[in-house]
Image (cartoon, grey):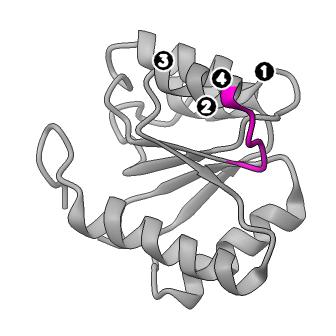
Amino acid sequence: MSNKVIMLVEDNPDDALLMLDALKANQIGNKVVIARNGVEALDYLFGRGDYAERKIADLPILMLLDLKLPKIDGLEVLRHIRAAEHVRFLPTVILTSSNEDEDRIKAYSLGTNSYVRKPVDFDTFIKVAGQLGLYWLRVNEPPFGRQK
């Protein structure tokens, strides 16, 4: 499992570091690619810009996507990936501080697989990251089978 990439789309460096620490604390050893804004996330997934040499068929096993991003917000990123054939089924978890009903409804209507509020408490954050990792990386069966 650790040979598959997790994509973290997070503009807050403190939250990104916290997620990396939480994954490590839960023995989730997957490589994590961090995109700091929506444009960078789409460039990575579509092999554009700085990622033009990347094989777009090598998709992350999971994308953790913040909503409030610079340049292109998380909902727009989600809209783009659900409209594109090669990334349509990428497991995507919205990981956000927003508890707005409207954000949740929009995210699900655009095809998010899960909507998780970022816990404020560090210990709870560690537990949530572990649960996400356990479910999405070990329990969930992706649509096209597990890739080694």
Foreground: disc 4 or disc 2: 2
Task: Based on the picture, tell me whether residue 134 belongs to the magenta stretch.
Answer: no
Foreground: disc 2 or disc 1: 2
Identity, as a three-letter code, of the amino acid under mark 3: Ser
Report the residue marked by disc 3: 109
The residues tagged by marks 4 and 2 sit, at their Cα atoms, a distance apart of 10 Å
Report the residue marked by disc 1: 72
* Residue 9, horizontal then vertical, whole percent: 68, 45
Q: Earlier in the sequence, mark 4 or mark 3?
A: 4
Q: Picture quarter containing residue 36?
A: top right
* Residue 148, horizontal then vertical, whole percent: 19, 61
For label 2, the SS is: helix
For label 4, the SS is: helix
Report the residue marked by disc 2: 104
| Start-end of magenta stretch | 96-101
Residue 49 showing in the rendered view: no
19 and 108: which is toward the camera: 108
